[in-house]
Amino acid sequence: MRIIGISGSQRQASTNTALLVALSEFFPVGVQYRLYDGIGKLPIFNPDMEGEQMPEPVKMFAHQIERADGLIVASPEYVHGIPGGLKNALDWLVSRPEIVHKPILLLHASHRGDLALGALSDVMATLSSRFSTDPILRVPLIGRSPEQVRSLTTSGEYKKRLVATLNSFLVDIVSS
Ligand SMILES: Cc1cc2nc3c(=O)[nH]c(=O)nc-3n(C[C@H](O)[C@H](O)[C@H](O)COP(=O)(O)O)c2cc1C
């Protein structure tokens, strides 16, 4: 099984990226998990460039989505919305087949950012028949360093919640 993580933050010390990285410790053997870190290299979405003219980085992105059995997305809120880079990446997928039935799990490394989370849920529900808002896992990690994120999420209550959420996501993929 292949799972791809996508962070909506380009920051080096992003809490959302760190949360996705910390998650890598909890995958069972046999699951290949990797982060897609190319959203910053995708050109701005232009419907005129879909099909034959599709830019190479977009083709590679779509190919990775195609090969994945599920996506895990974690994103901050910027100016009451989804960060432009992430929304741009998702826009490239909208008229393509790769994401239509792809299971998607949303994580959120903050107790704030409800507007972005709501908007992202709407977008995911539009893109994929297999997205569910139950669960969206929120972990209040705003302002933490990647090291702090790792230590907070790999023990105690947060670890328990992450493992339970991940396992039910994986079971759902296998059983459908
Ligand atoms: C340009 C900018 C705009 C932001 N706008 C919001 C906002 O509208 N609402 C909010 O709750 N947080 C906002 N934030 C805070 C980020 O969502 C928050 O710091 C988040 O934890 C960053 O995620 P990251 O650590 O993964 O980069 C903003 C941050 C930046 C840099």
Image (cartoon, rainbow, N blue to C red):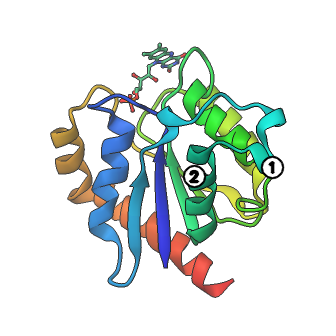
What's under tag 2, amino acid-wise? Phe
Q: Nearer the viewer, residue 13 or 156?
A: 13
Q: Earlier in the sequence, mark 2 or mark 1?
A: 1
Q: Residue furthest front?
A: 52
Q: Is residue 169 left or right of residue 24?
A: right
What's under tag 1, amino acid-wise? Gly
Is 4 rendered above or below residue 174? above
Quadrant of the drawing holding the C terminus: bottom right
Secondary structure at numbered mark 2: helix
List the residue tagged with mark 2.
Answer: 61
Residue 159: x and y in percent read: 29, 60
Q: CA distance from mark 2 to mark 1?
A: 14 Å
Label disc, if present, on residue 51 of the rendered structure = 1
Identified at 54% across, 80% down, the residue is 171
Secondary structure at numbered mark 1: helix
Is 59 rendered above or below residue 41? below
